[in-house]
Image (tube, rainbow, N blue to C red):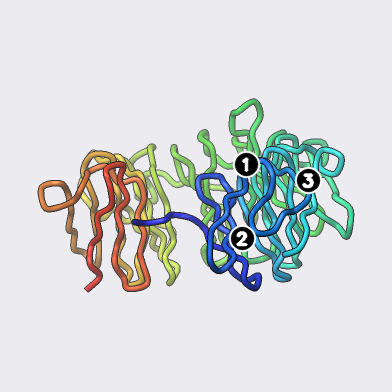
Amino acid sequence: MLEHFKDFSDIPELKFSFLGGTLEMYNGVNWFKFEEDLAGTTSYSGQGIPRYFTNMLQDEKGNIWIGSLKGVYKFDGIKWVHYDEKDLVSEKVLKLLIDKKGTVWAATEYGISYQLGDEWIDLNKKRGLAGTTVYNLELDPKGRIWAFTRNNLRFSGISMIEEGKCIPYDKHQTGLKGTIEQLIWNNGEIIAFSDDGVSLFDQQGLWKQFDKKEGLNESVFSKIVQDDVGEIWLASHKTLYKYNDGNWMPLKEPEDWVVLCMMVDKTGAVWIGTDKKGLFKYQEGNWSSYSIENGLIDNEIEEIFEDKKGNIWAITKKGISIVSGK
């Protein structure tokens, strides 16, 4: 049985998992689920924490930071500290990020709060954010923070935060109509991915949307990944593309697949999970596929995972299929 969760194990004898939005703790013998109140072999007197969390991180000192719809929680291995609407611009925390200096940033419903000493400093639309709600934060190799924003559930733009200054880029500047879901760092440039297009933020600070001139002949995209050697792979509803020096090279004839997940394994092979056509593998110009017809348990692939032995786990609603790495 595959347990699909994030593991945080640097605190001596304490391991944390983030499974289905619920926090669990392992004491070396047993797992304990945190319900409305913390409990286990040790009781943390009266520290009621919500059952559902948006994400969880660990800083260099070993502290666990948890974002939730009721604020930010910090656990130092002994006690919990709760930061709520009295400390943050909003207690509805959608994403946490820790920068290179160890500063904790919280993306919330009404802006950003970041910790400076014992205080939290707020950033909002009036201070340069491209929108009201910050739904994601990413840190680039230069140490800049990128805040993804929306207004009334609609994508409004993205903001770059550097040395306390916030520079907004609205959706018209990015050239993308859809919601930016991910950023890819590539030799000093940034590639922004949305389901309706891909844009480049160059080293001069200018945005340019990729189109037919760069090899993208479609406008609907599913996933983008970057492998360990920096190669960038883009899946559309019909084709897999590889990025090469400013252009996109199509690697497959139209397939009419719907891509649900994509990953690159340790050998450089690209694995693509689809909604109805099973699992595809691309490596060095060769394609192979796995479906119900040749042993896959189900053709709808929800997640793909590579274990330490190089085996590929295809997770479906009906069970798990394993493709041997040998």
The CA span between labels 1 and 2 is 43 Å
Mark whose residue sits in front, 1 or 2: 1
The CA span between labels 3 and 1 is 15 Å
Judged from this view, the residue extending furthest toward the front is 41
Nearer to the camera, 26 or 238: 26
Q: Quadrant of the C terminus?
A: bottom left
**Residue ID for mark 1:** 51
Q: Quadrant of the N terminus?
A: bottom left
Label 2 element class:
loop
Residue pictured at 52% horizontal, 58% vertical: 6
**Residue ID for mark 2:** 203
Position of residue 261 measured from the top left corner of the image (x, y, whole percent): 36, 49
Looking at the rendered structure, the kind of residue marked 2 is: Gln
* Circle 2 residues within 10 Å: few <14, some 14–19, many ≥20: few
Q: Which of marks 3 and 1 is nearer the N terminus?
A: 3
Looking at the rendered structure, the kind of residue marked 1 is: Arg
Residue pictured at 82% horizontal, 38% vertical: 85
Residue 248 makes an appearance in the image: no
Tell me if label 1 and label 2 are in contact, CB under 8 Å. Answer: no
**Residue ID for mark 3:** 46
Position of residue 39 measured from the top left corner of the image (x, y, whole percent): 66, 51
* Circle 1 residues within 10 Å: few <14, some 14–19, many ≥20: some
Judged from this view, the residue extending furthest toward the top is 152
Label 3 element class:
loop
* Circle 3 residues within 10 Å: few <14, some 14–19, many ≥20: few
